[in-house]
Structure formats: C-alpha cells, structure tokens
Image (spheres, grey):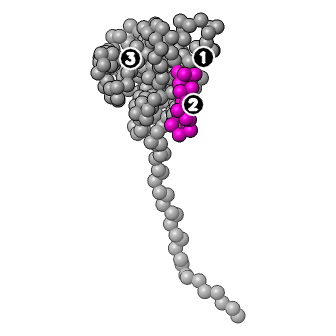
C-alpha cells in the first residue's frame, strides 16, 4: 500500500502584506501639449537654421519670414506677399542659442499657466494675435526701418501680461493652482500689490534695454523693447477675449493629504 506523507496540523500561511501604494511620478517637465509642441517647433526651426541651411538659405529664411517695418511703406506692387505672414512668422525664428534658450525658459514659465487655462486652440490664437500686436507697435515706432525683427519675446511678453490677470496669488485668498484662479478685472489687477510690483520690475527691465543696458545676452545685439511692450499691453488688456471660465477644483475630503503643484 502506498502511503503519502504530510506535515500534520500545518498552519495556513498568513496572507501576504501588500506594499504601500506608490505616489504617482511627476514628470520633470509637466508642460501642456500646446506649449510642448510650440517649444519643439522653435527648436526644430532653429536646428534647421544652424545645421541644414547655408548662409544664403538662412538669409532667404530671415528675409521671407522675419518682420521688416519697411515693407509697409513700399507699394504692394513692388514687393512679394511676405508682409501678410511675417507679422506672425518672425516669432518662430531666433538668432542664437542663447536667444532661443532664454526665450524657452520664459515661455515655459508664463506659457504653462496660460495654456492650461485657455486650452490649445485659444493658446494658438493668442500666440498669433500677440505676435501681430508686438510687430505692430514695433512698426509704428520704427516706421520705414529696414531692420529685421525675429524672436518670440513679444509673444512671451503677451503671456506675461495675460498672467497678470489671473496667475499671481491673491492676497488673503486660498492658494489654488495658478490656472484655476479667478480672472481679475483690469482695475483689480492694478490694485494687486503683487501684480503692480511685477509690472514695475518688468517695465524697469525694458527701460534698461531701451537705453542700451541688456539684462542678459549679447550687448552687441539690439533688442526690440518696443515689441515687448506691444505684446505685454495686448496680453494684459485683451486677455479676457481668450479666457474661459476655469473648472472649479475637485474638493478633497477633510484630513486627506494632497500634493499641490502650482504652475
């Protein structure tokens, strides 16, 4: 007879202890899609400028897509159609690594809360119109000038002006993620100490640029401070045309902990 052996009275094994749930990983660059693709586009264009195009091709690119105020004093019959798209396309071109890196950091800082708040389509429209506003003031103050304007600084200034309407924490109010704050009216924004201090510092910086004292970068390369002002004024005064009512934040049960990420 075959016998099977077994350990008598073997105690059942206790159920395995579940490891504590891991917190979700937060990416280093938590950028809205519209802003991420905008940065990628700027980088790809600049890489093509430096690595692919010859000097003659680069000159053609700047002339065809850069903004030149003199185009608007020359009869249309004596020039090409560049004057119709260059008030926007100049914002996609950059002249040096330092130029695009500096603009990229400011674009991430102020473009992220604006893009999260207004969404992709409105962000694209805001880019287009703020670029035109920046170029328009530059053209008015440099009427007939043959200099070339390139760079996204005017658009970034527009995003800074837009951010002044909602992104700064309001005094004596609960802190929310920046893009969920209520939009301030123009009068309310001008009554905010934080907004006023930021605007004064921004104006002082551009005043220094206007008199030839650059805050960063190559002092031999002129900076279009007037385009900055055109973009900022546009963003500050007309942001409400692009804004939408932000979704209210989801209420958390009392006593729970939550990681708060602020743009």
Is residue 166 visible in the rendered structure shown here? no
User: Disc 3 or 1, which lies upstream in sequence?
Assistant: 1
Name the residue nearer the viewer: 91 or 255.
Answer: 91
Tell me, yes or no, whether the highlighted magenta stretch contains residue 61: yes
Residue drawn at x 45%, y 42% is 28
Q: Which residues are magenta?
A: 48-66
Residue at 69 percent across and 91 percent down: it is 2
SS class, disc 1: helix
The verdict on residue 83 being magenta is no
Number of numbered markers? 3
Name the image quarter holding the N terminus: bottom right
Disc 2 or 1, which lies upstream in sequence?
2
Give the crowd class for mark 3: few <14, some 14-19, many >=20 residues within 10 Å: many
Callout 3 touching callout 2 (CB < 8 Å)? no
Reading the image, the residue beneath label 1 is: 82
Q: Which residue does the image show at 60% across and 86% down from the upper left? A: 5
Where is residue 174 shown, x and y percent of the image?
37, 24
Residue 30, image x, y percentages:
48, 37
* Residue that label 3 marks: 225
The label nearer to you, 2 versus 1, is 2
Say if 196 sits above or below 37 in the image: above
Could you tell whether 122 is left or right of 95 in the image? Answer: right
Look at mark 2 in the image and give the residue it sits on.
Answer: 57
Left/right placement of residue 174 relative to residue 54 reads left
């Amino acid at each position: 007879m075959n016998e099977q052996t077994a350990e008598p009275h073997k105690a059942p094994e206790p159920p395995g202890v579940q490891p504590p749930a891991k917190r979700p990983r937060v990416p280093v660059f938590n950028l809205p899609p519209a802003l991420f693709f905008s940065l990628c586009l700027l980088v790809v264009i600049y890489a093509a400028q430096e690595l692919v195009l010859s000097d003659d091709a680069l000159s053609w690119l700047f002339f065809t897509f850069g903004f030149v105020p003199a185009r608007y004093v020359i009869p249309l019959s004596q020039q090409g159609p560049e004057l119709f798209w260059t008030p926007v396309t100049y914002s996609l071109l950059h002249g040096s690594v330092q130029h695009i890196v500096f603009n990229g950091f400011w674009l991430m800082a102020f473009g992220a809360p604006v893009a999260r708040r207004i969404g992709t389509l409105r962000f694209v429209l805001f880019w287009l119109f703020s670029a035109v506003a920046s170029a328009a003031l530059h053209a008015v103050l440099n009427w007939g000038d043959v200099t070339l304007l390139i760079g996204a600084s005017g658009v970034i200034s527009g995003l800074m002006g837009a951010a002044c309407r909602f992104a700064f924490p309001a005094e004596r109010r609960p802190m929310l993620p920046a893009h969920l704050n209520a939009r301030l009216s123009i009068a309310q924004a001008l009554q905010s100490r934080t907004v006023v201090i930021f605007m004064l510092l921004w104006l002082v910086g551009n005043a220094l640029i206007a008199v030839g004292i650059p805050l960063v970068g190559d002092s031999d390369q002129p900076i279009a401070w007037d385009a900055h002002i055109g973009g900022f004024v546009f963003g500050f005064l007309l942001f409400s045309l692009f804004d939408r009512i932000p979704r209210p934040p989801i209420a958390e049960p009392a006593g729970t902990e939550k990681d708060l990420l602020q743009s």
